[in-house]
Image (cartoon, rainbow, N blue to C red):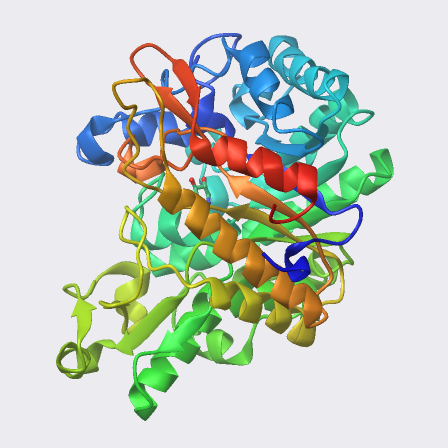
Amino acid sequence: MTSSARFPEGFVWGTATAAYQVEGAASAGGRGPSIWDTFSHTPGRTLNGDNGDITCAHYDHLEEDLDLVAGLGRCAYRFSVAWPRVQPDGKGPANQEGLDFYRRLVDGLRQRGVLPVATLYHWDLPQALEDVGGWTARDTAERFGEYTQAVVGALGDAVAMWVTLNEPWCVAWLGYGTGEHAPGYADVSKGLLATHHTLLAHARAAEVLRQATEAPVGIALNIAPMVPASDHELDVAAAKRADGFQNRLFLGPLFKGSYPQDMVEHYARYKPGWDAVLPGDLDQVSRPLDFLGLNYYSSNVIADTSRLDAARKAGYEVAPPVTTGANGDLGIARVGRVYAPHTGARWEVDPEGLTRLLVRVRDEYTSVPLYITENGCAENDYAGPDGAVHDPRRIWYLERHLVAARAAIEQGADLRGYFVWSLMDNFEWAHGFSMRFGLVYVDYPTAKRTPKDSYRWYRDVIAANGLP
Ligand code: IFM
């Protein structure tokens, strides 16, 4: 490795998890039901009917898991707080038992010399709020502000960085626009409302945090490069729509104080829709942030749905197009570059996409410090006869993305940190337990944790402040 794989002094190295994906203990400690409890217990919604009732049993293995985090060295740990543990009904007085769990978590991290990075919302909306409209209701943003108050009141002295929401695009569009995630609607109008209300919730939370703590406040977006499948004008236009839909729809309001004009026009026919945007809202949404978190896994190759035969002939892997919900409305299809490297879960590997993404965000949107708040891959890991888990493909994936991240720094991106998704294998939403992203292997029936080869590799990366 060359010296260019070393990172700047003070670079933050971390791992990440999310409450519903790892905690289990779904009805312990006064926790109320979330939309993911309802969704995953609805037949047909998740692979094999898998759910987060138990998952990694992190709630009951807290000390062991904190030791695993600390075993990586001087690092940060990004966890999420479950709103339904803190407010079982999504409003009203905080549930002390819920707050106590997270207090033990942040204290345990601090005692071990690990920086706690808290995400306030990683998709587990209290079901009681969904029952009155969920993210399609403006009031949910107000409730989120109150919830934030309770969390920062309990943890504010210990948390080093705050992420308001994780991937609001997934919340709004997978949850309400395509139906792949909880609560499971495939309704464009609902997706639009949820887009605006998640951004408003971010603004409310940021305001509350600013008054209560000096710790940096940001948001984590899943921005992905959209590459046209050909230079045909229809594919180029489709990639632009995909970029508007997943990227600019969130970057625009956050950093320019406006929704992108092409998306404003595209969605104008949906009611209710943009009328949810009230005077003054975007001024609040675009208040300066201290950092931007980017979750990067892959880039997307996009074709216009009228050109799928051409894409097939050009050698792309083409799945039947989705004609319903938000994807159908946009007339876009994601096609696969057959000969590109893929992860075990068939996600295309495109590290250079990460370099382009970081540079683009810096050039077009913001000069605030950037963090890669998630990056990782799902592989078909298993424990061998000796009990060890060898995952060379993950090491290869992570190494290539670190080289790409370093290249972005050389091109002027102010990248300050990198978090591997994930500390341990966990519940991968609609894919259930079929995808293993962890540096630590989890045997779900016994909850036994086994650090994979990549765990030791990452420990060495952290010690060397770059590729060893
Ligand atoms: O597991 C998810 C995480 O919850 C959000 N970002 C993407 C990860 C992998 O799909």
Task: Tell me the quadrant of the picture where the C terminus can be found.
Answer: top right
Expressed as whole percent of the image width and height from the top left, the position of residue 200 reads 63, 51
Expressed as whole percent of the image width and height from the top left, the position of residue 208 reads 77, 39
Q: In this picture, is 283 found above or below 451?
A: below
Give the quarter the ligand 1 occupies: top left
Image-quadrant location for residue 65: top right
Give the residue displayed 16% in from the left and 84% down from the top. Answer: 310
Q: Is residue 267 visible?
A: no
Give the residue displayed 61% in from the left and 8% down from the top. Answer: 97
Q: Is residue 288 visible?
A: yes
Q: In this picture, is 297 found above or below 465?
A: below
Q: Residue 389 vs residue 102: left or right?
A: left
Expressed as whole percent of the image width and height from the top left, the position of residue 311 reads 19, 79
Q: How many numbered circles does the render carry? A: 0
Give the residue displayed 54% in from the left and 79% down from the top. Answer: 261
Q: Nearer the viewer, residue 247 or 329?
A: 247
Expressed as whole percent of the image width and height from the top left, the position of residue 219 reads 64, 49
Q: Nearer the viewer, residue 89 or 439?
A: 439
Q: In this picture, is 428 found above or below 230?
A: above
Task: Tell me the quadrant of the picture where the N terminus can be found.
Answer: bottom right
Q: Residue 337 vs residue 258: left or right?
A: left
Q: Nearer the viewer, residue 40 or 457?
A: 457
Give the residue displayed 48% in from the left and 51% down from the top. Answer: 194
Q: Residue 73 vs residue 173: left or right?
A: right
